[in-house]
Amino acid sequence: MLCLGESHAYSGFNPEYMRMRGFNGSHFAQTLNYDLEILKKYDQKLQKLRYLLLPISYASFTNSLENQWEIKNYFLYYNIKKTHNPKYQTEILSLPFDINIEKLISYYISHTAAIMTDTNGYSTHYSNPNPDKNLVESGKKMAAVQTAKDYSNWNKNKEFLDEIIMRSKKRAVTVILFTPPAHNYYRIHLDSMQLNKTIRLAESFAKQNRNVFYLNFLRDDSFNEDDFYDADHFSSAGAKKLTNKLSTFIENLEKEPEN
């Protein structure tokens, strides 16, 4: 089992709580085109993959990593070279000077490793308590950041997801799309058109492909304030709860005769 996607999966999926062996390959701001590139790169190592989990969040079809600093992670550490801009080919050039100084001090003086995942790929950043937790402010801020100014990336991201599904279908891999839960302080600021378009598209992928399922947890009221790191990311308790829900769904699929 493999989970890809952006920070909602990075904070919300902890393979430790899955009854089936799995890995979290998501990361901050990881977009669908990089999900696809990761699948391509590790194609031969994923021969036994049975389930692919992908979050479909509010901005999944409107986001792009073009000209964003996170590109350097894929260029440097995955050897996925999708940029020709030297700025995103090194750690030093891709980040502001003050952040680089902080990272150098942290590593060489404080001897603190920059790695923020455990051996299963789960985020150790979100698993720690948030000293600045403010659900009201973070909800408003993150909704504003993720609300699209236009839909110029929509068709490209739709095509990336379609290719992911087609590749999975050829390998008899079941794809589980899921919209993660979010706190009401985040949900109240979402643009209804963008949100509804996103949900309808996810639903259509599930209807049109027998190997695809879609789960919408966005308004799941079993999640409380203690389950959130901020208004749209998960604490360790929230990650356990979401992972258990996904695990239960997969277990039920396993019981069906066709599986």
Image: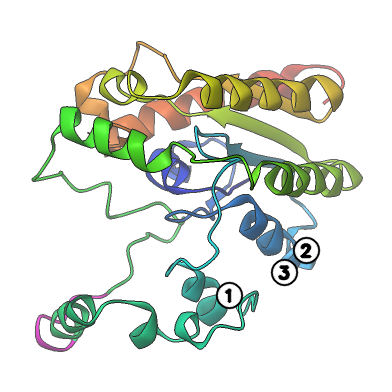
Which residue is under mark 1? 78
Is residue 83 one of those drawn in magenta?
no
Determine whether, in the image, residue 149 is placed left or right of residue 129: right
Q: Main secondary structure of the magenta part?
A: loop
Quarter containing the C terminus: top right
Q: Position of residue 183 (x, y in %)?
A: 30, 23
Image coordinates of residue 163 in percent, x first then y, are 81, 48
Residues under numbered marks 3 and 2 in contact, where contact means CB atoms less than 8 Å apart:
yes
Q: Where residue 77 sits: x, y (%)? A: 52, 78
Q: Residue at x 25, y 22 (%)?
A: 185
Q: In the displayed structure, does residue 138 sit left or right of residue 26? A: left
Q: Is residue 49 left or right of residue 237?
A: right
Which residue is found at the position 31% from the left and 26% from the top? 186
User: Residue at image x 43%, y 28%?
Assistant: 242
Q: Which portion, as a residue range, is magenta?
A: 108-113
Q: Can you see residue 205?
A: yes
Toward the viewer: 243 or 201?
201
The disc, 3 or 1, on the residue closer to the chain's N-terminal end is 3
Mark seen at residue 10: none
Local SS, label 3: helix
Report the residue marked by disc 2: 43
Return the residue at label 3. Answer: 41
Determine the residue located farthest toward the top in the rendered image.
Answer: 221
Question: How far, Cα to Cα, is label 1 from label 2?
Answer: 13 Å
Horizontal relation, residue 248 to residue 163: left or right: left
Query: Looking at the rendering, which quadrant does residue 177 occupy?
Result: top right
Q: CA distance from mark 3 to mark 2?
A: 6 Å
Camera-nearest residue between 57 and 9: 57
Whole-percent x, y for residue 46 in the image: 74, 58
Q: Dots 3 and 1: beta carbons under 8 Å?
A: yes
Vertical arrangement, residue 46 with respect to residue 89, above or below: above
